[in-house]
Amino acid sequence: MAEILTPYDTGQRAEPKLWQRNRAEVHQVMQHGDAEDAGNVDFIDDEGATIATVHVSRDPDGGHTVHVMPFTDTVRLDLHTEH
């Protein structure tokens, strides 16, 4: 039987990599770390290089903002607004 490759296997999608890999690391950052380090996800390519870091924050008015920090010149943002 042929192996079914996922979009992560083919490189079509960047692999997500959490900054904190387990609950203890999350608690450590929340208690003693920089607030900017909580909730981030790195997306890496096949070589393990970070393409972008992403996190979502709550706005003072109750809305949300998605923060995308690119590390390559070829990152584009495609906003899907259909519900």
Image (cartoon, rainbow, N blue to C red):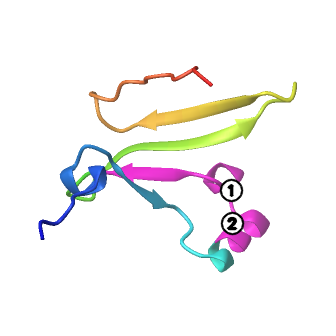
Residue at 58 percent of width and 20 percent of height: 81
Q: Write the start and end of the magenta stretch as one range.
A: 26-44
Asked if the residue at tag 2 contacts the one at tag 1, i.e. Cβ–Cβ closer than 8 Å, the answer is yes
Quadrant showing the C terminus? top right
Residue at 61 percent of width and 33 percent of height: 66
Residue at 67 percent of width and 69 percent of height: 26
Q: CA distance from mark 1 to mark 2?
A: 7 Å
Pointer 2: what residue?
Answer: 29
Quadrant showing the N terminus? bottom left
Q: Nearer the viewer, residue 63 or 10?
A: 10
List x then y, in percent, for residue 69: 47, 36
- Report the amino acid beneath label 1: Asp
53 lies above or below 65:
below
Is 63 left, or right, of 5 in this rendering?
right
Considering every residue shown, the one lying at the far left of the view is 2
Considering every residue shown, the one lying at the far bottom of the view is 24
- Report the amino acid beneath label 2: Val
Dot label at residue 20:
none
Dot label at residue 34:
1
